[in-house]
């Protein structure tokens, strides 16, 4: 891991950009801490710079108010990372099929499964590097989307002890089976009127998770209409399980 920039923000949070091989990312750590901080891995749908305002708002809240470190990395094929011709074709095919009202299951598999296969090992490598830093000690949480990445990651990564997953993206059928293997505490955020998300599929996924402690936060509104109070709801969820 190589840090490429560093700035102290006005709330005292230290923000550092880094690269890990070809993976760019951002790390936020509390301004002062008496012990190594717990860590939240912040997932997103790609485009780290485009998503920065929302990611930074969540991460800075966690760091300044709760003493958590937080980190985000760029997804494969997003931002300035090399594009995949197959992925771009799958996106085009998905838009066409949805507009035509045609079945999309096979296209979703072609689009999402390769992303999951690439992104999850990158997250685990990043976690290795982050936990080697003296200012970070765990435990570890994961939040955000793409939810298919979150399902696979929390199913295979034993160092993650709680997850706040954001519904709102397609989930291949095989990931429903993996969801049954997830047993850590979960909070799932669902926008009830998300125009790009199948509400019933999201509810079925919530039901499939094997966790004995799981909570569904469902709010009226579209994909980008998540209420601001959900930031603190996520923070309080992690405070219960990471502090």
Image: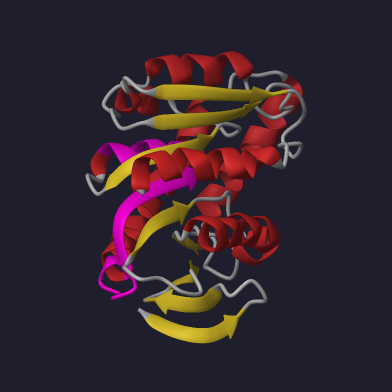
Residue 92 drawn at (x, y percent): 66, 42
**In this orientation, which residue lies closer to the viewer: 115 or 180?**
180
**In this orientation, which residue lies closer to the viewer: 130 or 64?**
64
Position above or below: 99 against 17: above
Residue 159 drawn at (x, y percent): 24, 49
Q: Quadrant of residue 129?
A: bottom left
Which residue ends up furthest to the left in the rendered image?
Answer: 158
Residue at 53%, 76% (x, y): give it.
14
Span shown in magenta: 130-155
Quarter of the image containing the N terminus? bottom left
Position above or below: 41 against 183: below
Q: Quadrant of residue 180?
A: top left
Residue 28 drawn at (x, y percent): 50, 69
Residue at 52%, 67% (x, y): give it.
82
Q: Quadrant of residue 2?
A: bottom left
Residue 23 falls left or right of residue 89: left
Residue 41 falls left or right of residue 196: left
Residue 126 drawn at (x, y percent): 34, 64
Q: Is residue 45 visible?
A: yes
**In this orientation, which residue lies closer to the viewer: 207 or 46?**
207
Residue at 58%, 38% (x, y): give it.
233
Residue at 63%, 34% (x, y): give it.
94
């Amino acid at each position: 891991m190589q840090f490429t920039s560093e700035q102290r923000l006005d709330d005292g949070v230290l923000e550092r950009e880094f690269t890990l091989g070809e993976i760019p990312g951002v790390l936020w750590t509390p301004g002062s801490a008496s012990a190594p901080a717990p860590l939240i891995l912040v997932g997103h749908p790609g485009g780290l710079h485009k998503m920065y305002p929302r990611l930074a708002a969540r991460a800075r809240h966690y760091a300044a108010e709760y003493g958590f470190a937080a980190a985000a990395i760029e997804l494969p094929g997003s931002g300035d990372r090399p594009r995949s011709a197959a992925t771009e074709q799958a996106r085009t095919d998905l838009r066409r099929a949805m507009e035509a009202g045609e079945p999309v299951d096979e296209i979703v598999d072609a689009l999402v499964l390769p992303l999951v296969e690439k992104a999850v090992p990158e997250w685990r490598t990043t976690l290795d590097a982050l936990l080697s830093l003296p200012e970070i000690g765990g435990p570890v949480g994961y939040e955000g989307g793409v939810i298919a990445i979150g399902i696979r990651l929390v199913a295979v990564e034993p160092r993650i002890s709680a997850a706040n997953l954001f519904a709102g993206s397609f989930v291949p059928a095989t990931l429903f089976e993996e969801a049954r293997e997830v047993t850590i505490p979960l909070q799932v955020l669902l926008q009830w009127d998300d125009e790009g998300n199948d509400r019933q599929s999201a509810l079925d996924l919530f039901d499939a998770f094997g966790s004995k402690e799981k909570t569904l936060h469902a709010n009226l509104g579209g994909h980008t209409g998540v209420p601001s109070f959900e930031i603190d709801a996520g923070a309080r969820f992690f405070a219960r399980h990471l502090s």
